[in-house]
């Protein structure tokens, strides 16, 4: 045994994470360094965790380990991950099976990177894949590529490390927004319940006032009749009549005030119900976007075995996205292409001419635009063109990847009537 750093160990940027470890010398008949792709057991153990967590889904890892141990079918995802990391450092049949599984899983990306012959060429391919969101396969191809140097390996590891933080933060923000929406819904429900109780009490008071008014009116009528017919043995004192009339006027004024309060309460209740419905739609939209985003992060999870079928309706279709943010366009196109669709893009008239919209709508099967990032002119133009062509269009809640995925993964997305809106 000789103590020396691995050939592929980042010697500067990752030195605190990847210290020198005892490494056996290569056998005499091994391929010379730099002439073949690295095997997973050749890569420093400090990178194994990121490889297993990024380049294999939990379902794929479970299927792999089930071939070696039946207990893998019931182990938790965390237990499977730890076993996969341990397996990555073994140069035996199990480690070779893991390496072959990763190669098969990312065969297309490995072939693409194989055309690169220098670290700069590998880095360009890595940055392109990173921009397009094709990260798992590109990460595996970079770490095993013979031309990858220490600096590039450290750079790729750093991107994956920070991406895990960003994904976790994004999910936490979505969950926080969902919890706030649910709390708001609970508060609205309490407000509606209190208003309904006040409304019922006001209705009871109104009924009682009506009964009392009818009694007073009957008494006034009897007194008036008694004053006009002396034969009736009922006193018809003028002071009594004035007192009853005054009470009757007071009750009528009170009834009018109560009726006004009742109308205001009914109006407030209607407004609360409308706001409650809006909160419910928003919570449903957030939940759908969160589910779509999580499904995009792990598309082959066994617990979502039918996830792939959700996008079958997009195969071969062409979509038009109008407006949005320029920095998101590549990710939207990658998401559409990953589901078998083609995405046409128009910025809503900032740089792209509005005269292009009729031609783009004619090519597309459906149009989408985010209501928070598109001009009123462009939105109205798209709606009119889609209605004229009898094509569906959807308005998205926000200019985000999650809103886009939640909309297009609706099974009836392309069959909805023109003008149908996504949940707000």
Image (cartoon, helix red, strand yellow):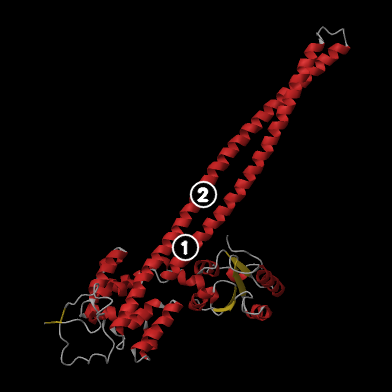
Q: In the figure, 285 relative to 62: above or below?
A: above
x then y, percent, for residue 182: 49, 51
On the question of residue 182 being in view, the answer is yes
Asked whether disc 1 touches disc 2, contact meaning CB atoms under 8 Å apart, the reply is: no
x then y, percent, for residue 290: 47, 63
Number of callouts = 2
Give the foreground label among 1 and 2: 2
Q: Which residue is mark 1?
A: 290
Q: In the figure, 195 relative to 59: above or below?
A: above
In the image, what residue occupies the spot 87% across and 7% down?
A: 231
* 55 horizontally vs 397: left or right: left
Classify residue 390 by image quadrant. bottom right
On the question of residue 101 being in view, the answer is no
* 279 horizontally vs 114: left or right: right
What separation in Å lies between label 1 and label 2 (alpha carbons)?
19 Å
In the image, what residue occupies the spot 78% across and 19% down?
A: 245
Q: In the figure, 248 relative to 166: above or below?
A: above
In the image, what residue occupies the spot 62% across and 75% down?
A: 350
Q: In the figure, 43 relative to 167: above or below?
A: below
Q: Nearer the viewer, residue 10 or 111?
A: 10
x then y, percent, for residue 312: 51, 74
Q: Secondary structure at mark 2?
A: helix
Graded by Cα atoms within 10 Å as few (under 14), some (14 to 19) or many (20 or more), the crowding at tag 2 reads some
User: Going from the N terminus, do you reach mark 1 or mark 2 first?
Assistant: 2
> Residue lying furthest left in this view?
1
x then y, percent, for residue 201: 62, 32
Graded by Cα atoms within 10 Å as few (under 14), some (14 to 19) or many (20 or more), the crowding at tag 1 reads many
Q: Which residue is mark 2?
A: 184
Q: Nearer the viewer, residue 365 or 379?
A: 379
* 33 horizontally vs 273: left or right: left
Residue 17, numbered circle: none
Q: Nearer the viewer, residue 88 or 104?
A: 88
């Amino acid at each position: 045994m000789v103590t020396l750093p691995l050939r592929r160990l980042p010697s500067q940027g990752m030195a605190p994470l990847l210290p020198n470890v005892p490494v056996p010398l290569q056998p005499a008949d091994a391929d010379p360094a730099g002439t073949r792709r690295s095997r997973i057991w050749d890569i420093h153990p400090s990178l194994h965790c990121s490889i297993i967590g990024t380049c294999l889904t939990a379902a794929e890892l479970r299927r792999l380990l089930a071939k070696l141990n039946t207990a893998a079918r019931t182990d938790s995802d965390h237990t499977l991950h730890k076993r996969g990391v341990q397996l990555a450092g073994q140069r035996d049949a199990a480690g070779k099976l893991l390496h072959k599984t990763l190669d098969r899983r990312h065969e297309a990306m490995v072939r693409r990177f194989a055309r690169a012959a220098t670290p700069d060429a590998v880095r360009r391919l890595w940055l392109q894949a990173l921009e397009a969101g094709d990260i798992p396969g590109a990460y595996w191809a970079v770490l095993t590529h013979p031309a990858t140097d220490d600096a590039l390996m450290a750079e790729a590891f750093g991107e994956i490390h920070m991406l895990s933080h960003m994904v976790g933060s994004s999910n936490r923000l979505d969950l926080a927004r969902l919890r706030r929406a649910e709390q708001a819904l609970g508060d609205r429900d309490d407000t509606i319940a209190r208003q309904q109780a006040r409304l019922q009490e006001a209705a009871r008071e109104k009924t009682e006032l009506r009964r009392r008014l009818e009694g007073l009116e009957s008494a006034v009528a009897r007194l008036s009749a008694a004053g006009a017919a002396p034969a009736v043995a009922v006193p018809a004192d003028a002071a009594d009549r004035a007192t009853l009339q005054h009470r009757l006027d007071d009750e009528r004024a009170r009834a009018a005030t109560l009726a006004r309060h009742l109308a205001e309460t009914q109006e407030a209740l209607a407004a609360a119900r409308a706001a409650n419905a809006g909160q419910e739609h928003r919570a449903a939209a957030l939940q759908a976007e969160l589910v779509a985003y999580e499904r995009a992060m792990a598309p082959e999870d066994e617990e979502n075995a039918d996830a792939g079928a959700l996008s079958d309706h997009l195969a071969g279709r062409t979509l038009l996205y109008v407006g949005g943010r320029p920095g998101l366009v590549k990710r939207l196109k990658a998401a559409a292409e990953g589901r078998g669709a083609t995405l046409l893009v128009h910025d809503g008239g900032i740089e792209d001419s509005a005269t292009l919209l009729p031609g783009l709508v004619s090519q597309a099967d459906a149009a989408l635009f985010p209501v928070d990032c598109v001009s009123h002119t462009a939105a109205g133009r798209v709606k009119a063109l889609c209605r004229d062509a009898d094509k569906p269009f959807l308005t998205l809640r926000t200019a985000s990847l999650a809103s886009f995925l939640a909309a297009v993964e609706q099974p009836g997305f392309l069959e909805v009537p023109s003008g149908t809106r996504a949940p707000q």
